[in-house]
Image (spheres, rainbow, N blue to C red):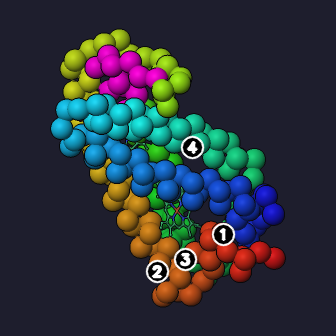
Amino acid sequence: MLRNTTERWGSISKFFHWTLAGLIVLQTVLGIAAVTWSLSPVKLDLFVWHKSFGMLILLLVVARLIWRFLSPPPQFPAEMKPWEHWVAHASHALLYLLMLVLPLSGWVINSAVNIPVDLFWLVPLPAITQPNESLGAVAKTLHLVLFASLALIVVMHIAAALRHHFLLHDQILIRMLPSKRNRP
Ligand code: HEM
Ligand code: HEM
């Protein structure tokens, strides 16, 4: 089942969800390693990986949103209260927004501090701003703040998924898992 139905996530949505979740964890490790590594060729390589995977995340999020438009998500279980719908919609919207603006802020840093990069050592990343030291400093702070916000919401998101599974005993977590149990 490639498309979503009113009750289940299809395999394309699941692929996007778990690929992006994995890439965001990898990206966090690469970002922290790149910033804290002592100045060396390894540090420069870590930054190339970080920028490359960050731009790949941006591309995949855009593709995921297009697919979400073409194949709308399943409905929430009938037992869920209106406030729970609201919190779920708002947190998912925030996750999408952060997955877009976080890489964009990284792209602004890269352009403003004027360090050209070839993504995966192959594709030159064009600049989206003129070189500008103060803009670079603002974008660095923004990148960190956006990352902290994403980390906070992801923790709440995982806690909510576990609440649905272990306390409410509904299908919310099960239907996002790539397991056989979720197939009709
Ligand atoms: C979802 C995607 C991304 C995530 C989760 C992410 C996460 C992080 C993290 C955790 C750090 C270390 C903490 C910090 O200093 O801010 C960092 C630093 C950095 N990231 Fe990203 N990043 C993403 C995308 C990008 C992209 C697309 C670029 C550039 C094209 C980029 C460029 C940078 C740079 C230059 C730094 C060092 C900032 C500094 O020196 O303060 N990031 N990122
Ligand atoms: C262990 C980690 C994670 C678990 C257990 C998990 C679980 C889930 C579940 C069960 C859903 C489906 C909700 C429903 O059926 O209505 C979901 C949706 C979603 N998840 Fe996760 N998730 C995890 C990590 C992440 C990460 C790291 C991100 C992104 C930063 C993320 C972003 C989203 C978004 C945006 C949706 C909404 C999908 C849509 O409505 O289009 N998730 N997640």
Q: CA distance from mark 1 to mark 4?
A: 19 Å
The nearer-to-camera label among 1 and 4 is 1
C-alpha separation, residue under disc 1 versus residue under disc 3: 26 Å
**Where, by quadrant of the figure, is residue 184 drawn?**
bottom right
The residue at 47%/34% (across/down) is: 52
Quadrant housing residue 138:
top left
The span from disc 3 to disc 2 (Cα, nearest Å) is 14 Å
Q: Is 84 or 96 nearer to us in this picture?
A: 96
Q: Earlier in the sequence, mark 2 or mark 1?
A: 2
Tag 4 or tag 3, which sits nearer the N-term?
Answer: 4
Q: Nearer the viewer, residue 142 or 19?
A: 19
Q: Which residue is mark 1?
A: 178
Q: Residue at position x 28%, y 40% from top? A: 34
Q: Could you tell me the amino acid type at mark 3? A: Lys
Give the residue type that dot 4 points to: Val
Magenta span contains residue 117? yes
Question: Disc 2 designates what residue?
Answer: 163
- Residue type, label 2: Arg
Q: Which residues are magenta?
A: 105-118
Q: Residue at x 68, y 50 (%)?
A: 68
Going from the N terminus, do you reach mark 3 or mark 2 first? 3
Task: Quickly name the residue at label 3.
Answer: 81
> Does residue 6 appear in the picture of this structure?
yes
Task: Tell me: 33 left or right of 129.
Answer: left
Q: Where is residue 84 drawn, in percent x and y?
A: 50, 71
Q: Which residue is mark 4?
A: 61
